[in-house]
Image (cartoon, rainbow, N blue to C red):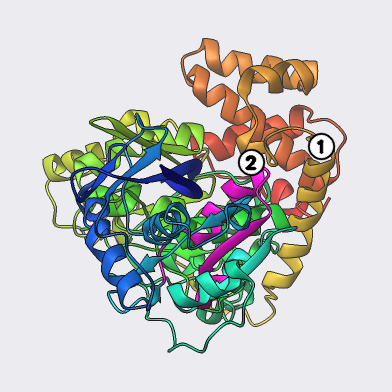
Amino acid sequence: MAFATTRTIALQGASGHLIDVQADVSPGVVGTTLVGRPDVSLNEARDRCRMAVVNSDLDWPSTRRITILLSPADMAKRGTHFDLAIAVAVLGASGQLPAAALEDTVFVGELTLSGGLRGVPGVLPMTLAAAARGITRVVVPEPQASEAAMVPGMSVFGMRSLAQVVAELQGVEVPEAAPVAPMSGARLLSWRGEERLGELDLADLRGMDDARYAVEVAAAGGHHLMLSGPKGAGKTTLAERIPGLLPDLDPTESLELTAIHSLAGALEPGDGRLTRPPFFAPHHDASKASLLGGGTGRVRPGEISRAHCGVLFLDEFPLFRTDVIDGLRQPLESGEVHLARGGESATFPARGMVVLACNPCPCGGYHAQARHNTCDCSELKRRVYRARVSGPVSDRIDILRHVAPLSPHDATDRFAEPESTATVRSRVEAARRRQAERYAGCSWRLNGQAPGPLLGDAWPLEPAARRAVDDELYAGRLTSRGAVRVHRLAWTVADLRGVERPGLAEADVALRLRTGEPLDLATLARRAG
């Protein structure tokens, strides 16, 4: 009896699990049996691997019984990236490869019938999972070698064909091979917004001091934000400038985000780490699966996960489908998306800023001041439209701001000098450095992610500030969840001002940001501390 074991990775959401691919070649009824809960595409690997081995001028043990186990056997497995590990395990079991060469190595790649290697999505999270389990060597399709090499301490072998992999394991000269075929399936297009949004500057915007300050606080603390106002007031224009306020990703954030984009199949061969916060603005007709994740076959991360550490902008929010709006409750609260269907579950991170924009009515022309009001919607239509933003969702939004149309004075003020994105970003970066020092050793990085109970115990407000928040809570103007968000906002305001601990002034600003009340001129004047 001949037996060999190789290793590969099975993905469940953004998490990877080490899989032993065990092959046994022994006398018996001729055939190939694949066990261990494979899906349809994985069952077809038997034929792909057999023809790849034969067409690589290697021997497939066609006169014996071949049994292949994917262990642990109780875990559902899917995908074509198991091909290489299966083929190498069969070659090892038939005595064509030394057992020692297969140790401490993970094999990832889809095989063509000619023996070539095709790219597969998720190489980076697979390599991260392998490194977390002590594996130090990984074999991947050649174009994705740079992706796998992002993981520190990992020896990466980028190969074009099964023949090259076998030659490397045998320690002989590696033969030439045709270039690797592109990744199977349609590539998901990714707009990271770096080129276009890099040209947008807050200095281009006049007026909107109240909303600009709210955006600054949201960017500094990673808070969710809702902008409301009539059409043409500048909600979208302001939201598109938020990514420019965010600092570059640190190495941990960069690796997390790049791994998510790898899972989504959104990395081109040769792409390096993503270093800038992403910006995504899906259309309001987007499905729940495209926004939150899921899909048929392999579970893919949605737009909210691809905007991890960046900005997800949902314009015309009340026009989104009801199931999409309600589905945002969990990620807005926990910063994660949990998907479950049948016996499969997946978890994707979603700790980005969610920015919502909505009009006051379906036509977008309603204004509280009659001289500006161009709305022809009935009161019933306006009420139904506003009810689309459910209470549980709006309660999970940290900052509510009304964006008013530009006043004639602001539009014609020749002496106005709006702050540039670079100026505001410097304050945001300073505030985030204070948060990094305060939360050193914690699993979260920003005020907007801090757990409420721990925040109250370890980082309380000044007594007067605490009483002001409690008064609003007991009066019914704040929910318990809203009070926690005010606490977080108060810390962000304090960080922007360089204050050691939030006092009554910071709590007052936080309450106004939370409830949508206008900020006073003194608050806007103190923004720089």
Residue type for callout 1:
Ala
Q: Neighbour class for label 2 at 10 Å: few (<14), some, many (≥20)?
A: few
Q: Nearer the viewer, residue 66 or 494?
A: 66
Residue topped by disc 1: 440
- The part of the chain drawn in magenta is 119-145
Q: Quadrant of residue 213?
A: bottom right
State whether residue 205 appears in this view. no
Q: Callout 1: helix, strand or loop?
A: loop
In the rendered image, the vertical position of residue 116 relative to residue 41, given as above or below: below
Quarter of the image for the N terminus: give it. Answer: top left
Amino acid type of the residue that numbered disc 2 sits on in the rendered structure: Arg
Disc 2 is placed on an element classified as loop
In the visual, does 175 lie left or right of 371? right
User: Residue at coordinates 54% horizontally, 35% vertically from top-left?
Assistant: 514
Nearest to N terminus: mark 2 or mark 1: 2
Residue 161 appears anywhere in the view = yes
Residue 345: in magenta span: no
Q: Nearer the viewer, residue 315 or 346?
A: 346
